[in-house]
Image (cartoon, helix red, strand yellow):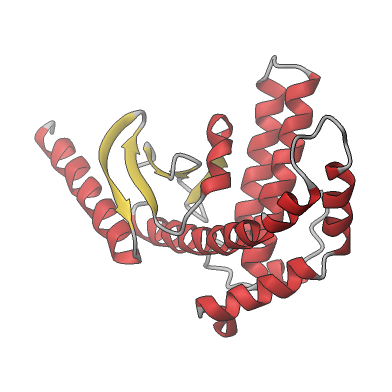
Amino acid sequence: MAKNDKKLTVASKEDYTFQMLLNDIQESALVGEEDSQAGDKAERERQSKLIVLQMLIDRANEYNDESHRDDEKLRNAIDVKVNNDVYLAGFIFYISQNPQFDYSWNYLRKRGNSYKEFLVEGIRFLDNVLADINMLAGKSRTHKDVHVVMNDIIDVSVTGEKPFVKACVLWENFHRIASIKRDYNFTVKSKECILIAGKRKKAADAERLIDAALVMLNNTEGSTE
């Protein structure tokens, strides 16, 4: 898939960026395809899922500036974008004319507002995910078995080299993308063992959960010495 959004390349060398998130997801998908025995249908579906994720990541990066921190301004920008998307309008009409399709053209057009809200929440979700990944990268660089699962969709592992974290998508839970929200479940694991879990509503929630998990690991390691 093309990576033609120039803004994706503009970031501090010390930060984990939207570009890195996209690269990690694409690389993990390729590994998954190599290991999968599911066949051509699953591979085609994986490519379609990647397009959806790239669209959301691109939009999160596009609106990653001070002028869109306010929800109303973000919603207005999304409204303009969707309303002026002639390809989307054409697709809605085209699919509504399929006699095997149960929903009318009017129904699909009315669903536009829900789609816009999906984009807004998806952007906010990814904003928060990126902030949490950067926080994690700065917290633990020695516990290589530690990883964080966000909303049962994105799994971020601690690595031993820069940028100290690596993300992948739990493809079996991809359907959760459709109901994504900015607040999400945040689970810290060591290998497959759950250390701590909670609801992430603000950055402090994620940091509190990470700190508590690291204390648990340090205490465990100290008791075995």
Instruction: Tell me where residue 77 sits by quadrant.
Output: bottom right
Q: Residue lying at the far bottom in this picture: please name it.
A: 67
Residue 97 in which image quadrant: top right
The percent coordinates of residue 104 (x first, y second) are: 77, 45
Count of numbered badges drawn on the protein: 0
**Relative image position of residue 157 (x, y in whole percent):** 45, 43
Q: Is residue 153 placed above or below 108 in the rendered structure?
A: above
Q: Residue 162 at x, y = what percent?
A: 52, 55
Front in this rendered view, residue 49 or 157: 49
Q: Residue furthest left?
A: 223
The answer to whether residue 127 is visible is yes
Q: Is residue 192 above or below residue 203?
A: above
Left or right relative to 16: residue 116: right
Check the image and report above or below for 53 versus 195: below
Where is residue 205? Give x, y as percent: 28, 60
In this rendering, does residue 19 appear at all? no
Going 18% across and 48% down the picture, which residue do you hit? 215
Of the 4 image quadrants, the one containing the C terminus is top left
Q: Horizontally, is 119 left or right of 55 in the view?
A: left
Residue at the extreme top? 37
Q: Viewer-proximal residue, 217 or 189? A: 189
Residue at horizontal 67 percent and vertical 64 percent from the top: 59
Q: Residue at x 79, y 30 (%)?
A: 44
Q: Residue at x 42, y 59 (%)?
A: 132
